DNA sequence: ACAGCTTAATTCGCGCCTTGATTTAACTCG
DNA sequence: CGAGTTAAATCAAGGCGCGAATTAAGCTGT
C-alpha cells in the first residue's frame, strides 16, 4: 500500500538534492539557471543545494558563460575526481574490470582469463578481487574513494540460492565471496543488463525515455533493458526475450523448450541452420568469423533473409508488448545482422507489430563497442550515488 | 529529466493526503492508528489530514472498534455518497453504462444497442451521452456530484488523429464529441484496459503488485494491464500481446500478419482450426456456444490440447518479458479454455518460460463476470479522484 | 573610464509541512 | 467510582521551498 518515499519534509530535501545532482550530471556543464529550469526548482533552492554540493566537493565551478550584458553564469559540473566507480564484466572466457572517475573516463582496466567450464565461482570471485586491487594500484586511487563496484554476471541475477543455471556457477555464492573480500558496496546485474545500461547511458540517441535494448550474442543470450518513462539513470531491467516462442514446436533450444527466438537467431543456431540448408563452413571454424562469413554471403541458402525475418518478428512482439520509443539492437550477433541489412529487420518488425505501435518506434543499431560492458556495469554504483 | 512531482513542500502535503485517502479506500473501514501504520505517517499527521477530509465530507466516521482497556478507535471510511463515477463500455454490439458510488456499488445502469458496422462515431457518442443522462435520472444523482466518466473503447486508444483501425471508428473524434456534450471529466482506455482494471481492483487475489491480465475474447482481442510495483490503483496499460508471433509464417491473422497468437487462440481461429481438423460444427452456429461445445468435446481433433499449448506458450513469453507476480487469464474465451484445463495452460507456460521467472509467477483465472467492464471503466475517474 | 544597465547569485522572511511531546478524551476493570 | 490504558487532538519546534529584495559581476555607450 506504500508508494512514495518522500513522506517527510526532510526526505523531500534529500530528494530534490539528488534530482538536481542527477540533472547536473547529465547536462554536463550547466549553469545554476539551467538547472533551475531543468529541475523546476526555484533559483533560491538551486543556489542552496549547489552551495552544499560544492562544499562537499561533489560539484565544482568550471568556467563561465559569456555574458551579454549581465553577470555571466558560472558553469557547474560534478567533480570527476570526487569519487570513482568500478565495473566488472564476467564473461565466459575472461573477466574485465574497469575503473572510472565520475566523468566515466576509464582510468585503469584489467583483464583476467578464466575458463568458466572448469573453474568455479570461487575462482571467479578471487579473480575479481585481484583485478580490483590491480586497477586501484594502477590508477593510484584510494580504496575509500571508490563509491562502489558494479558486476555484470552471466545468466539471470534473480536471487535464489537453489537452482542456478549452470552447475558450477552460483551467483549468490559470488556475492557472498565478494562481500567477504571487500568492503566496497557491490551492485549486481546480468550481462545483458549492463550492456543495455551502457547503451542507455552512452549510446547513440542518448537519453530517449522508453528505450528497449535487445542484445544478441552467443554467450550472452538476449535481454532487455527498459529506460523508464522518466529518463536516463532510472533504467530497470525487464526480462529476457530470447526464449519467447517464435515457432511453436520448432527447433529445440538449449533452454529445453522449442522454437525459442534464440533457437533461430542465436549464433550457434544460425550456423546450424546454415549447415542444414546446405551451406559450407569448416567444422572447426570459430564462431565469430564463421558467422561473419555467412552474413557476408549466405551461399544462396536464404538463411540470412530468414534470420532477419525471425529477428524482426521477435522485435515486433517486443514493440507490441512494451511499446517503446526506441529499440536498440546490440550484441555482436545483433550488430552483424543489423549492419548487413537493418532495413530487412525493420521491415519484418513492421509486418509483425501493430501499425500504431510501430509508427512510434525507431529501430537502431547499438553504437558501442564490446568493451562498453564494464562501463555499463560501472553505471550501477554511479546511479546509486546520484540517487543519494 | 523531471521525475517526481512533490518538489515543493505544499505538493508533499497534497501527496500525503492522497496517499492516506487511497490507503483508506483500499483498507475499507480503518482506524486512524491503522492508517498511520499503513502509510508510515505519524499519528499527528494522520489526525490532521483526516480532520480535513472529514470536514470536506470525503471521509466519515463509521462505528468504532471495541476497546480493551483504552479509548476505542473510531473507524473511518470514504463516504460512499460523496461522489459518483460512471463507467462506459463500448462494445461492438452494445454500449453499457454504469453509475457507481464511491464504494463501487452500482446505482444504475443502461444498455444501448448499436451496430458498429453501420453506425459511426457520432452515433456512439450520442448514445453514450443519452445513456449518461439516463443513469443520472435513474439514480437521482446530480450531475455535479459525478467525479468523472471512464470510457473503454475498442481498439487501441493511442492518440493519433490520422490512421484509425476501422474506417468508421475514430477515437479522437469520440473524445471531441463527448467533451462537447458534457462537462464531466472524461477518461479513456481500451476495452482490454478496463477489463484488466476490473480484475486488478475487484478480482480474485486482489491487490497483488505486478499483475498481468491476459484477456482473450473474439471481439476484444487480447490485452495486458500491469499493476505497477507499487500497488492497486496505479495500474498502467502496457500493450497488446494478441499479435505476438507464435508460429513464424503460420496462419494468416486479420491484422495482416501471420502466425499471431490471436490467429490460434482467438475465438474464430479456434473454430477455423477445429473445422480444418475435421471437427463438425454447424456453419451458422453462434460463436460462444460453438466454442463451448468444442471446449467440452473436441471430437478427438486435438484442437483443444493444441490451443492450450499455444496459449501457454504465449503466456510463457509474457512471463519471460514482464516477469509478473501473477498472470490472470480473462475474457470469455480465456475463461472457457481455463475452466476446462488450466493446468494444461500452466504446464505449457512453464515449458516456455525460464525456470526462475515461472517459479515466481502464478497463473489464475479471472473471477469476474463479463459485466465487470463498466465497473473497471469507472475505476478510471475513481483513481483520478484518489490521486487528488 | 565611468555611470547606467542587465543579468546572476545570494539572502531573508513567510507559509507550509511533519513530527515528538504533551494534553485531553473515552473507555475498561477491579 | 477511581485508577489505568489507549486513542485522538493540540502544541511548539525544526525544515523546506518559494518569492521578493538585495548584492555581485559583468557589459555598453558616451
Image (cartoon, coloured by chain):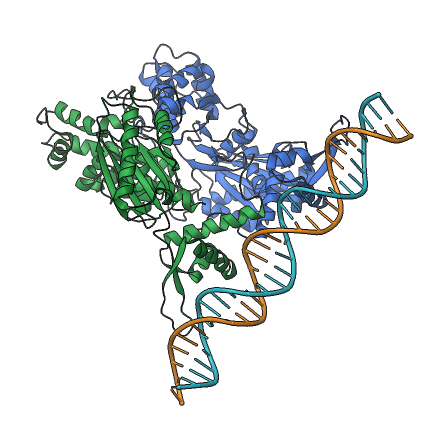
Chain colours: A green, B blue, C cyan, D orange
How far from the left and from the top, in percent, is residue A32?
A: 44, 61
Residue extending farthest to the top is B300
Residue visible at 33% across and 35% down in the picture: A151
Along the horizontal axis of the image, is A194 left or right of B83? left
Residue visible at 12% across and 31% down in the picture: A290
Q: Is residue C11 above or below residue D5?
A: below
Image quarter hosting the C terminus of chain B: top right
Along the horizontal axis of the image, is B297 left or right of A222? right
Residue visible at 45% across and 37% down in the picture: B237
Q: Nearer the viewer, residue A385 or B184?
A: A385
Q: Nearer the viewer, residue A251 or B42?
A: B42
How far from the left and from the top, in percent, is residue B306?
A: 34, 17
Q: Nearer the viewer, residue B306 or A149?
A: A149
Q: Quadrant of residue B279?
A: top left
Residue B75 visible, this angle: yes
Q: Quadrant of residue B105?
A: top right
Along the horizontal axis of the image, is B360 left or right of B301? right
Residue visible at 35% across and 23% down in the picture: B354
How far from the left and from the top, in percent, is residue A17?
A: 48, 51
Residue B117 visible, this angle: no
How far from the left and from the top, in percent, is residue B63?
A: 75, 31
Amino acid at each position: 500500500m506504500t508508494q512514495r518515499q518522500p513522506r517527510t519534509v526532510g526526505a523531500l530535501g534529500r530528494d530534490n538534492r539528488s534530482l538536481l545532482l542527477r540533472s547536473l550530471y547529465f547536462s554536463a556543464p550547466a549553469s545554476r539557471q539551467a538547472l533551475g529550469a531543468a529541475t523546476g526548482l526555484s533559483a533560491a533552492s538551486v543556489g542552496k543545494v549547489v552551495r552544499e554540493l560544492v562544499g562537499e566537493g561533489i560539484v565544482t565551478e568550471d568556467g563561465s558563460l559569456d555574458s551579454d550584458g549581465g553577470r555571466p553564469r558560472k558553469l557547474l559540473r560534478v567533480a570527476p575526481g570526487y569519487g570513482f566507480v568500478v565495473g566488472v564484466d564476467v564473461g565466459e572466457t575472461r573477466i574485465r574490470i574497469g575503473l572510472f572517475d565520475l566523468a566515466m573516463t576509464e582510468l585503469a582496466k584489467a583483464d583476467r582469463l578464466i575458463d568458466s567450464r572448469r573453474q568455479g565461482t570461487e575462482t571467479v570471485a578471487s579473480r575479481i578481487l585481484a583485478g580490483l586491487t590491480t586497477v586501484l594500484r594502477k590508477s593510484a586511487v584510494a580504496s575509500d574513494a571508490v563509491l562502489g563496484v558494479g558486476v555484470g554476471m552471466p545468466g539471470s541475477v534473480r536471487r535464489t540460492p537453489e537452482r542456478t543455471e549452470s552447475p558450477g556457477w552460483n551467483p549468490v555464492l559470488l556475492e557472498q565471496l565478494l562481500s567477504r573480500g571487500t568492503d566496497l558496496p557491490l551492485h549486481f546485474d546480468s550481462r545483458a543488463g549492463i550492456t543495455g545500461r551502457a547503451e542507455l547511458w552512452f549510446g547513440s540517441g542518448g537519453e530517449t525515455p522508453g528505450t528497449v535494448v535487445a542484445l544478441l550474442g552467443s554467450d550472452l543470450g538476449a535481454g532487455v533493458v527498459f529506460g523508464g518513462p522518466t529518463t536516463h539513470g532510472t533504467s530497470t531491467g525487464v526480462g529476457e526475450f530470447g526464449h519467447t516462442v517464435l515457432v511453436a514446436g520448432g527447433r529445440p533450444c538449449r533452454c529445453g523448450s522449442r522454437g525459442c527466438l534464440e533457437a533461430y537467431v542465436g549464433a550457434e543456431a544460425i550456423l546450424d541452420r546454415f549447415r542444414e540448408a546446405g551451406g559450407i563452413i569448416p567444422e572447426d571454424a570459430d564462431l565469430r568469423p564463421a558467422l561473419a562469413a555467412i552474413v557476408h554471403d549466405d551461399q544462396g541458402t536464404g538463411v540470412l533473409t530468414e534470420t532477419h525475418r525471425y529477428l524482426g518478428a521477435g522485435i515486433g512482439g517486443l514493440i507490441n508488448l512494451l511499446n517503446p520509443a526506441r529499440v536498440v539492437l546490440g550484441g555482436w550477433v545483433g550488430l552483424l545482422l543489423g549492419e548487413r541489412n537493418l532495413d530487412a529487420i525493420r521491415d519484418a518488425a513492421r509486418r509483425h507489430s501493430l501499425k500504431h505501435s510501430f509508427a512510434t518506434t525507431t529501430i537502431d543499431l547499438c553504437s558501442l563497442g564490446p568493451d562498453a560492458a564494464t562501463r555499463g556495469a560501472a553505471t550501477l554504483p554511479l546511479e546509486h550515488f546520484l540517487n543519494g
